[in-house]
Image: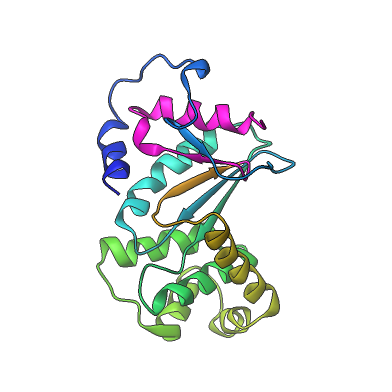
Amino acid sequence: MKKVFALFIGLFLLSLNVNAADFKEGTHYEVVSQTATEKPEVLEFFSFYCPHCFKFEPLMKTLQQELPANVNIKKNHVNFIGGSMGPQITQAYAAAEVLNVKEKFTSIVFDEIHTQRKTINGEKDILAMFVKAGVEEKQAKAALASFPVNGLASQMKRNTENFKIRGVPTLIVNGKYKVNTGSVKSTKEFIELVRFLTQKTN
């Protein structure tokens, strides 16, 4: 977590000249799987309860703007932060994705937890946030209990276990490379590292 925090301090320093050849396994990234995904993707593991993830959001938005359009950026909520609410918030994020309101919902949840300092206590509070995102309470409640949402939430849990995620935010690129965020010293270097990994398969 200290390495991640160090990233936030250095991200907005003057950008350095970045050469892809300078990115080294074991320093800038780790290989966590033998096979890569068929298409380039960036999978961000995060938690709404994580203050570093909240601060990481602007950087992820910048990354999305800078990467090629064919790179799919996805988010995976983890269950191990937030106590008993962790899995419920994962279920809620899955529902937001199925209901096509994940960006609005993400902004609302981060704001309530980290800006307004509100405590989320169960389904009632979750449904209220869906209403703020423009979803009728009845529709949101049905989505939370639906088969597609249960499946997506279960997949997020499996992803967390399969990649042995212990801290967030964590980026897995192409299903094979874990970004060592503490190794980069600027926004430009971070973006170029992720870009380099999206083009790498071996």
| Quarter where residue 16 is shown | top left
Q: Is residue 151 above or below residue 68?
A: below
| Quarter where residue 142 is shown | bottom right
Asked whether 137 or 67 is in front, the reply is: 67
In this orientation, does residue 99 appear?
no
| Quarter where residue 195 is shown | top right
What is the magenta range? 174-202
Image quarter where the C terminus lies is top right
Asked whether 55 or 130 is in front, the reply is: 55
Residue 20: % across, % down? 52, 19
Q: Is residue 170 above or below residue 50?
A: above
Farthest residue to the right: give it: 38
Query: Is residue 13 rendered magenta in the image?
Result: no
Residue 119 is left or right of residue 94, and the answer is left
Residue 97: % across, % down? 60, 64
Residue 192 is left or right of residue 117, and the answer is right
